[in-house]
Amino acid sequence: MKLLLVYLAPFITSTGGAEKVCCDMANAMIERGHDVSILYCYGKAGTPFFPLDKKIQLCNLMALHPEKWKGQLEPKLPKTQKIIREVLRVASISWAHGWEEDYFGKLIRSDLTEMLQTEKPDIIVCNWPKEANYLINYVKTSVPIITRFHFGAQILAPNSSPGSKRACSKSQYVSVLLQGDLTYLKKYIPDARGIVIPNAVPQYKEIQTVLCKEKAWYTIINIARLDKHSKRQHLLIEAFAQLSKKYPQWRVELWGVDWNKKYKKELEDLVAKYHLKNRVLFKGVTHNVLEKNLAADIFAWPSAYEGFGLAMAEAMSAGLPVVAFRSCQSAREIVREDCGILVSDGVNAFSKGLEELMANREKRVQMGASAKESMRQYAPDKIWDAWDRLIKKGRE
């Protein structure tokens, strides 16, 4: 079957969970006998950060007619359109998204039409509702579409544009990541045919042995882009600052892209304020997540919201116990009480959660082992087989 994965974003340069899932899905569908292409949108040529099978065709929408984009790296709203969007945002985030999507839908409609005529897919999987909006309501394609909610439906469903909501209702299926997401999908897009398929989590053969050992340094790790509103690494730094003197052998490692330079500076200022220069380390991007998790002792996840929390799940699969906020839906659904510490909102509560594990090596070992076992339900073969069945069903 000819499968087109649509991800209209800077797919080539990005190192996040959505990009990893897209690459993993493409590879898995190739293994299951599908002919796979990925449609993305970026103003430069390049190769993805994550590995891709050589059989997968990369299709760059901006490469069709590059003169249209005037050197832009990604499609951007003109200044006047941005002003209108932000005025609309005061009244409704959904309306603001609708204004932006209407502009881009009209802008890329002919390019999308041309791409579909070239690729001739049997079925399309869109990574975001807005992509389904472009294809269903602007291109008016008759190709069956499955729409994915990579992000949490509790935020994405109510704030999606009217056009995106209509597109979800017209999609063959709408895939969400967690059982709780179905509630929000049914509330805000009641006609959508929702189905739960979680992210695939690697099943590591390597055994976590570091947790049992005496060592010079113990490590709290966080792997995520540096982001103030979602990932909130500042809360981890402030929580650790309350414990740093009592636990002088502990340190924090922050792995992830500097997504926002201003926020990175704020984090560096926090480190300086609490005199933690050699205790909180900004490590940048890593190509070997497993190696970093196996060398750590606790995975800290101060996120406000996540679609699934793939980095957290990968850490658990590597045998790390987790500290996270109970208010984060994905943490609440994924982290069992024997796999980590879920705390109330706030720095003090997060600090207490960290200390509960920092002070008790046996508890870290026990929770780490339970965390690893709990991730078996998300084994890649189970998840990709479910997707294979859905794709075939969506084509019927």
Image: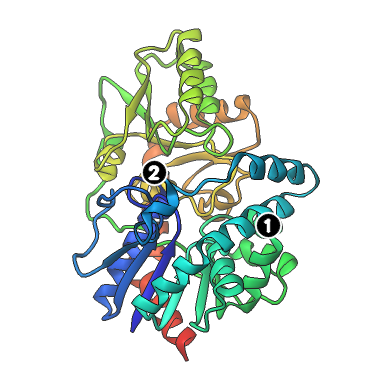
Give the left or right position of residue 183, taking residue 288 as reference: right
Residue labelled with disc 1: 98
In this view, 340 is above or below 130: above
Residue at (34% x, 47% y) in the render: 319
Mark 2 residue type: Gly
Mark 1 residue type: Gly
- Can you tell which of label 2 and label 1 is closer to the viewer? 2
The mark found on residue 71 in the picture is: 2
Residue at (34% x, 81% y) in the render: 2
In this view, 218 is above or below 23: above
Give the left or right position of residue 9, taking residue 95 as reference: left
The percent coordinates of residue 112 (x first, y second) are 46, 68
Marks 2/1: CA–CA distance? 26 Å
Residue 297: image quadrant is: top left
Is residue 369 visible in the rendered image? The answer is no
Relative depth, front residue between 56 and 178: 56
Is residue 292 visible in the rendered image? The answer is yes
Residue at (51% x, 74% y) in the render: 146
The percent coordinates of residue 290 (x first, y second) are 27, 45
Residue at (36% x, 62% y) in the render: 64
Report helix, strand or loop for mark 1.
Answer: helix
Give the left or right position of residue 23, taking residue 196 as reference: left
